[in-house]
Image (tube, rainbow, N blue to C red):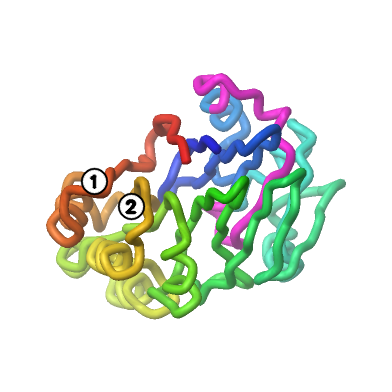
Amino acid sequence: MITFSLQSGSNGNSIYVEAGEVGLLFDAGLSGKQAEGRMRVRGRDIREVRALIISHDHNDHIRCAGIYQRKFKLPIYMTEPTHRSARCELGPLQDVRYFTAGKRLQFDGVTVHTIPTPHDAADGVAFVVEHEGRRLGILTDLGHPFAALRRRLPALDAVYLESNYDPEMLESGPYPWHLQERIRGRHGHLSNEEAADLVRSVGKKLQWMALAHLSEQNNDPELALYTHRRRIGKELPLRLATRYDVSEVMEV
């Protein structure tokens, strides 16, 4: 299994996973032109993607899903509440395939486990992609370290894990109080410390972790890496899913 992030952050999210002959794209938060170009940089044709799978209805994850379907002919998998919430923004869609949060999707030997999250979306999910005994987590927009997340992490071989904000930067930054409360609340995002402590406690099997969904205003990549290193040690390889460009290709 190989994977790379096309982009990760509040300015747009999309992650590519290839297992066997199956290529899957998770979320559609950057333009069709950007997505096509970044896939090409890594030697992949976006038109050959088997499915576009949407995590939730927030714009940085779904806003270009309609474009991906109309331009690249990708079938879209999402929950019905997610579609209802975002319908007016997506334009006409010809191929939408609903799934229920918590159920599995199957693609020629590749299983995508969907995990309901407490994030403040209409019907948010995170994902575990499984193929030939290997498991990759795509875990962002989580709310807080909920019980099902703690149960899933010990079985993962690699993970994209949100490390959204530094508490001090959030408190002293430009966001108004109500937005700060939303971000650090039980339906917002994980801080650097929460993500690191979660992996330290239950992520013993991981081959690598990619820090994802870093805030531009309330975090810094070097600070996020430092926080994780300080709390979990030097043994686990750490990568960054940047908000500015395509990531390196990572193998599971």
Instruction: Determine which residue is flagged by label 2.
Output: 214
Q: CA distance from mark 2 to mark 1?
A: 7 Å
Residue 210 seen in render: no
The amino acid type of the residue labelled 2 equals Leu
For marks 2 and 1 on the same chain, the one whose residue lies earlier in the sequence? 2
Q: Is residue 219 depicted above or below 177 in this figure?
A: above
Q: Position of residue 63 (x, y in %)?
A: 61, 49
Circle 2: element type: loop
Horizontally, residue 42 falls left or right of residue 195, namely: right
Quarter of the picture containing the N terminus is: top right
Q: Residue sitting at 73 percent across and 62 percent down?
A: 83
Horizontally, residue 169 falls left or right of residue 28, namely: left
Q: Is residue 182 depicted above or below 172 in this figure?
A: below
Residue 95 seen in render: yes
Rate crowding at label 2 as few (under 14), some (14 to 19) or many (20 or more) other CA atoms within 10 Å. Answer: many
Tell me, yes or no, whether the two marked residues, 2 and 1, touch with CB atoms within 8 Å.
Answer: yes
Instruction: Determine which residue is flagged by label 1.
Output: 221
Is 53 covered by the magenta stretch? yes
Q: Position of residue 176 (x, y in %)?
A: 29, 70
In this picture, which residue range is highlighted in magenta? 39-61
Q: Residue sitting at 66 percent across and 71 percent down?
A: 102
